[in-house]
Image (cartoon, coloured by chain):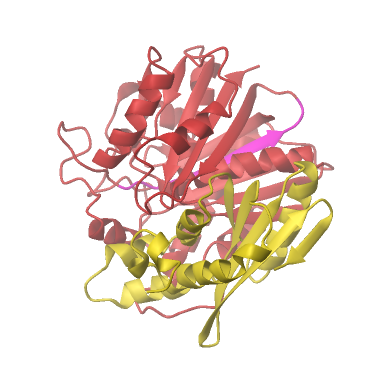
Amino acid sequence: MSEWQNRVERSHQLDEAAQILCATWWEKRYSMGPLPDWLILASPSASNWTDAHFVRSEMPSPSKFVHTLPNVRGAALLQLMNWHGPVLCIQNDPHTVHTALLEATMLAVSEKARVWVASSWLEGASWRAEFYVAEGMEITKK
Amino acid sequence: MAFILSYGCSSAAGRGASRLMVVLNLKTDVSRDEGFYFPNRAGDSVLELLTGELGAAFHEACTSARPALDERFGVILASTKGMSQDFIGNRGAERAHDPLTPLLDAALDHLELAPARALCVSNACSSSLAAIRLAEIWLKQGLDSVLVLAADAVTPFVLRGFSSLKLLAANRPKELGRDGFWLGEAAAAIWLTKTPSAFAVQASLDNDGSLVTRPATSGASLKRALLQLPLTPAPDLVFAHATGTVVNEETEEPVLGEIFPDIPRRASKSLLGHTLGASAALDLIAACELIRARQARRVLISSLGFGGAHAAALVEGV
């Protein structure tokens, strides 16, 4: 079990989208700078992959079902970050990440806030995650 | 702060805010076959069903009032699962895009709307209040008005999931000793503007990443969401999330009891079912109706969701 998994409640029950989000943040945590005022979750394809697995399973798994909500992948990330605050889970496929970055930039300016965008998705056969930080008029990919 | 210009809704009670209030005021059970479904829903796909019900809610709102046509407006759809049943069916086929955006696109086509900004918010069962909070921010950022749409349906996917979690009540909703909830369906449309109107609303969010399927037992996150709102003067009514699950009651009741010890509490889920992402929109509309009928002046709404999501809203007559 990796170090981040020891810090998350029932980490073995996380779906792949949540695992990659946590693993990526753990890897980048020292380069992220101060914790955010707002967090935006941007999940291309939402929870489709987990939805499909839940539907296919003969014995429906409750832990799989809870991850059929796209915002739930953020719960483990918040535990790792040891952070609380306003979270928005945004969907606008095929422009979900682009929309989230625009929203983050506008939020950073109008609320004078530091806004993180956390995104995880399945690309081909591999899971990927990316983090962005918006502050003032700038947005930086981490 | 934003102002509520107009609203409309549809639920198991039927179409219209007045139907909603008949059920809430008379405590009439309108459940059908183990759930609180939209009347006359047979045969529709989830996409057609929700688009039609959102259309009815939108037209009810616009019959009362709608922003001027030349205004710059945005649209936010609040939903937990959107049209996911149509999307994956029972075959488990995977699709490239999320199941919420097609519902938003279908609703915009159906309503012939071309907003300056549009997106979906999926903050589990607190999605409606998250959308209201985002709408407040969009108004501050320069839009003239924002239409918040909220919708969820009871599908085999959702029923199977909540059954697996053992959160569905075995007893009928009005019976004593129930230990869970019945699912419900709803659609709502709420026009928000920055121009003073009949109702003012403020929403707040807090997420603590507590255990995935239950709120933080300390109630700390719910308290933080509540205390972000201007609670002086105190609200004279509280709409609790009150799903009926043991976990919800163990967390929400002590917090509401501590902050609002002498303020009466109401809940809608035992009469309308738990309508998931649309549930707080129904509570918000019920609050407006009670204020309009002079049965309340300031109403607090509490809303919780999986993934540690906590939200609250305060609505008052202007």
What residue is at 24 percent from the left and 60 percent from the top?
A: B164
Residue A7 in picture, x, y percent from top left = 41, 60
In the displayed structure, B67 sits above or below B237; it is below
What residue is at 47 percent from the left and 14 percent from the top?
A: B236
Q: Residue furthest bottom?
A: A125
> Which residue occupies the foreground of this view, B63 or B163?
B163
The magenta region covers: B183-195
Q: Give the quadrant of the N terminus of chain B.
A: top right
- Magenta part mainly helix, strand or loop? strand
> Which residue occupies the foreground of this view, A141 or A99?
A141
In the displayed structure, B244 sits above or below B287; it is below
Q: Give the quadrant of the C terminus of chain B.
A: top right
Q: How many marks?
A: 0
* Residue B111 visible in this rendered orientation of the protein: yes
Q: In the rendered image, what is the letter of the chain coloured red?
A: B
Chain A: its colour in the image is yellow
Left or right of residue B5, residue B267 in this image: left
Left or right of residue B70, residue B300 in this image: left
In the image, is residue B186 part of the stretch drawn in magenta? yes
In the displayed structure, B12 sits above or below A15; it is above
What residue is at 48 percent from the left and 71 percent from the top?
A: A17
For residue B100, what is the image quadrant? Answer: bottom right
In the image, is residue A53 part of the stretch drawn in magenta? no
